[in-house]
Amino acid sequence: MRKPHNPQSRITNVRSFLPRQRFAGEFRPLVAQEAGEFLAHLGRLSPEDRRRRFGNPIRDGAMANFVARIDWSSGLVIGYFEGGYLRGAIQLAAAGEGYEAATAELAIQIESDWQGRGIGSALLRKARAAARKRGVGRLIFFALAENQGVTALLSKFGARFRRVGSDVTGDLPLAVPA
Ligand SMILES: CC(C)(COP(=O)(O)OP(=O)(O)OC[C@H]1O[C@@H](n2cnc3c(N)ncnc32)[C@H](O)[C@@H]1OP(=O)(O)O)[C@@H](O)C(=O)NCCC(=O)NCCS
C-alpha cells in the first residue's frame, strides 16, 4: 500500500539519499601475479591523471620500475575490475622513513571514463576498512595541491590538509565507521 504523503516531511529530494553508485564491476585485492595488470592500468591513465597520480609526468620505464618495486607481501592494492580490465585501484604501502611503524600511505587512481561514478569513494571505504583490519594506526596521503578531484574525495572522508610547497599532505581518519 502506498504511504500517505506526510506534509511535515523534510525529505524533498529522495535521490540525494541513495548511494551514488554508478558502476557494475567488482572490487578485489590484487595478487603479485597481477603486477602486469596494474602496470597496464596505470599506462591507460591520461597524461594529466598520470601526473596527478605520481606528482610528476613519470615516463613508462619509471612507472614499470615503480610497479616492479611494489612489496606485495606487506602492501595492499585493491582493484576495481570491469569487463575483465582493471579500471581503478587504491594502493596502501608502508610510509617508510620518518614515520612510526604501522603508518601507511595511500594512493588512488581511476581511469578517466570511470571517474565520477563513485568508484573512488568505494575504493577509499574498502581501503580504510582493510587498513583497520591490518592494524594500520595511521593512514596518510600526499597529493598535488591543485588536484581538486582527490582533495574533494579525501575531504568527504574527513581528511584535513596541510600545504607543503606545491603539495598537500594529511591524515585520513581511520576511526570513522565504514
Ligand atoms: C581523484 C579520483 C581518484 C576520484 O575518483 P572518482 O571515482 O572520480 O571519485 P568519486 O566518483 O567517488 O567522487 C568522489 C567525490 O569527489 C568529487 N570529485 C571527483 N572529482 C572531482 C573534481 N575533479 N573536482 C571536484 N570534485 C570532484 C565528486 O563530486 C564526489 O563527490 P560527491 O560524492 O559529493 O558527488 C580520480 O579523479 C582520479 O583517479 N584522478 C586522477 C589520479 C589522481 O588524482 N590520484 C590521486 C593521487 S593520490
Image (cartoon, grey):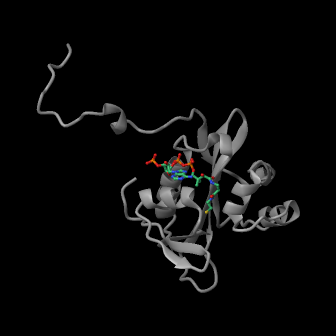
- What percent of the width, then of the height, locates residue 142? 59, 71
Residue at x-position 60% and y-position 38%: 26
For the view shown, which residue lies furthest in the right direction?
61
Tell me the quarter of the picture where residue 27 sits. top right
For the view shown, which residue lies furthest in the top direction?
1
- What percent of the width, then of the height, locates residue 160? 43, 70
Tell me the quarter of the picture where residue 23 sits. top right
Query: Is residue 117 something that shows in the picture?
Result: yes
Say which of 175 and 163 sits in front: 163
Quarter of the picture containing the N terminus is top left
Query: Is residue 72 something that shows in the picture?
Result: no
Tell me the quarter of the picture where residue 17 sits. top left
User: Looking at the image, how many numbered discs can be counted on the residues?
Assistant: 0
Q: Above or below — where is 4 with respect to 44?
A: above
Image check: 70 left or right of 176? Answer: right
Say which of 40 and 104 sits in front: 40
For the view shown, which residue lies furthest in the bottom direction?
98
Image check: 23 left or right of 36? Answer: left
Residue at x-position 63% and y-position 79%: 96
Say which of 104 and 161 sits in front: 161
- What percent of the width, then of the height, locates residue 93? 63, 68
- What percent of the width, then of the height, locates residue 174? 43, 65
